[in-house]
Image: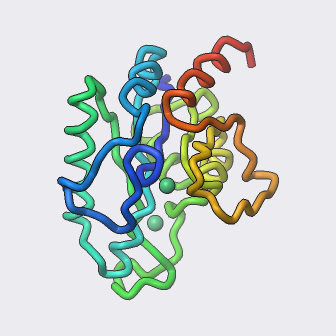
Amino acid sequence: MMKAIFLDKDGTLIDDLPYNVEQRRITLCPGVGSGLRLLARLDYKLFVVSNQDGVAHGYFCEQDVEGVAHRLTELLFRERLNLEGFYYCPHHPDGSVAAYARECNCRKPKPGMLLQAAHDHGIDLRASWMIGDILHDVEAGNRAGCRTLLIDNGNETEWRLGPRRIPTRMAPDLYAAAVLIAEEDKVPR
Ligand SMILES: [Mg+2]
Ligand SMILES: [Zn+2]
C-alpha cells in the first residue's frame, strides 16, 4: 500500500495570500523543495488537501482552483517533485453560491478529503502524515488516522486545543518537518 504526505496548501506549501488564484503570485514557502524531496526519497507520495471556500463565497470558480493546482504542479515539477493528487473542498455552510453552500464531509477539520484520497489511491492512512499550519489540519489528519505535523509559523492564532487537535510533532518549516518525519520513521510503531 502507498504511504502519503497530505499537505495543506495555503501557508504550508505556498505563501498565504488569502483567496488568491492569480498564478504568477503563487510562490513556494521556504524549505518546501528540499523537505519534500527528502520525503519523496522515503517513498511518500505527495497529495494536496485544501479548503477552497472562496468557491462557495463566489470569489472564484472551480476552474480557477484547477489553475492553481496546475501552477502548483509546475512549481513542484521544477523542484523535481511529483504531485500525486490535488483534493479541495469548494463548500462552506454560509456560502453565497447555492450549489456549494452546504455542510459537507470534506471541509477540514473533517477528514473527508484524506479518506477519499485513501480510497482512490490505496493509501495506508496509519503510515501517512498530514502536514498543515493550523490545528484544523491537525484535526483532519488525526481523524483520518494519520500522524500529524504542525508547521508552527504563526498562522495558527486561536490555539483551540482538544484531544484530536494535538499534533504528533511541530516544526518551523517543511524541511525541518521532513527531518522529524524521517526520524519518526526509524522508530518502530
Ligand atoms: Mg493553511
Ligand atoms: Zn466540502
* Residue that sits furthest to the right in the current view: 163
Residue 48 image position (x, y, % from top left): 40, 45
Q: If the image is split into quadrants, where does the C terminus sit? A: top right
- Quarter location, residue 17: bottom left
- Observer-nearest residue: 116 or 27? 27
Q: Residue sitting at 51 percent across and 46 percent down?
A: 114
Is 129 left, or right, of 101 in this rendering?
A: right
Q: Residue sitting at 73 percent across and 13 percent down?
A: 188
Position of residue 25 relative to residue 131, above or below, is below
Residue 71 image position (x, y, % from top left): 21, 47
Residue 72 image position (x, y, % from top left): 27, 44
Its colouring scheme is: rainbow
- Quarter location, residue 100: bottom left
Is 66 left, or right, of 48 in this rendering?
A: left
Q: How many marks?
A: 0
- Observer-nearest residue: 70 or 84? 70
Residue 98 image position (x, y, % from top left): 36, 86
Q: Residue sitting at 60 percent across and 59 percent down?
A: 109
Is 34 left, or right, of 167 in this rendering?
A: left
Q: Residue sitting at 67 percent across and 49 percent down?
A: 143
- Observer-nearest residue: 107 or 35? 35
